[in-house]
Image (cartoon, rainbow, N blue to C red):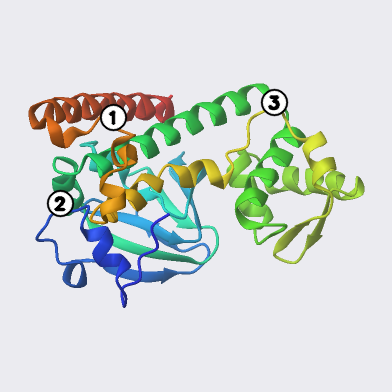
């Protein structure tokens, strides 16, 4: 994961993946977002947001005033991937902080310019986009096939993998994740508490027995944070590529599949192929959300 410290050197390292002339001190905006506050507003354009620390939830608004959570975005992940790959702004989508988030706002133009010059950054973003699309598929299948108690236990396990054994979430948040009324969440959590899996507290839920919670959960895979953090690990190699030892290591190009510097024309063709796949994924995702 890239940790960007505006007062230190990590931001300048990250900027090496962007346009050479990008002035991060002038253009980037770092902010602390409180729980429940918006990170990306509906239909927002012009910016990408890097979650440096914390956890955010992506929502889609339906029936004018009702929102459903369609995924989580954690540390080291970007908000605004659809716009980054040329997708149209969607006024129904927005992102809010689940817990306090440290966020770095990056101009969309700087990120888009970098995709054509940084294969490592392109690989990171395309992998994150693919992972988000796969996550949407799992959520859709789970909502269609699994009952509420199993889905609720599954989401608690997903949150526990990212936040630890004390989850600072409310019944209202879980209702938006599960697509049910708060009354349904209350009854489900009471059952898990009677079984000794959890303990409800004011404004939070404590995981007491993770094995009992796993037994209650549906069979859907848990998107553990290690898997998502791996998506951005190539950047650690890319930003330190000036080191002689790393320059000799092919891991810089593992996500692309070859040393693109040896054949610029092939690199451009490869980037075009990846962009075409990403645009296809965006179109399919928008169809799923609109279904």
Q: What is the total number of numbered labels drawn onto the structure image? A: 3
The image position of residue 154, as x and y in percent, is 69, 38
Label 1 crowd bin: few (<14), some (14–19), many (20+), radius 10 Å: many
Q: Is residue 193 left or right of residue 268?
A: right
| Foreground pick, 221 / 171 | 221
Snapshot quadrant of residue 82: top left
**Disc 3 marks which residue?**
146
Residue at x 38% of width, y 63% of height: 103
Sequence-wise first label, 1 or 3: 3
Label 2 crowd bin: few (<14), some (14–19), many (20+), radius 10 Å: some
Q: What's the distance in space between the residues labelled 1 and 3, CA to CA?
A: 30 Å
Could one spot residue 70 in this view of the protein? no
**Disc 2 marks which residue?**
109
Discs 1, 2 touching: Cβ within 8 Å: no
**Disc 1 marks which residue?**
278
Snapshot quadrant of residue 254: top left
Residue at x 47% of width, y 29% of height: 134
């Amino acid at each position: 994961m890239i940790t960007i410290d505006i007062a230190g050197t990590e931001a300048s390292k990250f900027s090496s993946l962007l346009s050479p002339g990008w002035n991060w001190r002038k253009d980037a905006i770092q902010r602390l977002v409180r729980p429940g506050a918006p990170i990306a507003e509906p239909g927002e354009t012009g910016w990408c947001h890097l979650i440096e620390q914390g956890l955010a939830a992506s929502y889609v608004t339906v029936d004018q005033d009702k929102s459903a959570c369609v995924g989580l975005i954690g540390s080291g992940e970007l908000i605004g991937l659809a716009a980054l790959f040329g997708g149209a702004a969607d006024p129904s989508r927005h992102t809010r902080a689940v817990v306090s988030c440290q966020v770095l706002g990056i101009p969309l133009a700087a990120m888009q310019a970098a995709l054509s010059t940084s294969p490592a950054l392109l690989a990171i973003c395309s992998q994150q986009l693919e992972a988000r699309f796969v996550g949407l598929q799992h959520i859709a299948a789970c909502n269609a096939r699994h009952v509420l108690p199993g889905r609720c236990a599954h989401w608690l396990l997903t949150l526990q993998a990212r936040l630890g054994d004390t989850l600072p979430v409310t019944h209202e948040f879980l209702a938006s994740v599960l697509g049910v009324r708060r009354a349904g969440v209350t009854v489900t959590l009471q059952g898990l508490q009677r079984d000794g899996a959890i303990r409800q507290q004011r404004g939070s839920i404590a995981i007491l027995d993770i094995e009992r919670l796993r037994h209650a959960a549906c069979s859907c895979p848990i998107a553990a944070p290690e898997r998502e953090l791996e998506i951005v690990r190539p950047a650690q190699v890319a930003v330190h590529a000036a080191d002689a030892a790393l320059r000799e290591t092919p891991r810089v190009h593992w996500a692309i599949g070859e040393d693109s510097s040896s054949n610029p024309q092939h690199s451009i063709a490869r980037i075009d192929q990846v962009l075409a796949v990403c645009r296809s994924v965006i179109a399919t995702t928008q169809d799923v959300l609109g279904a």
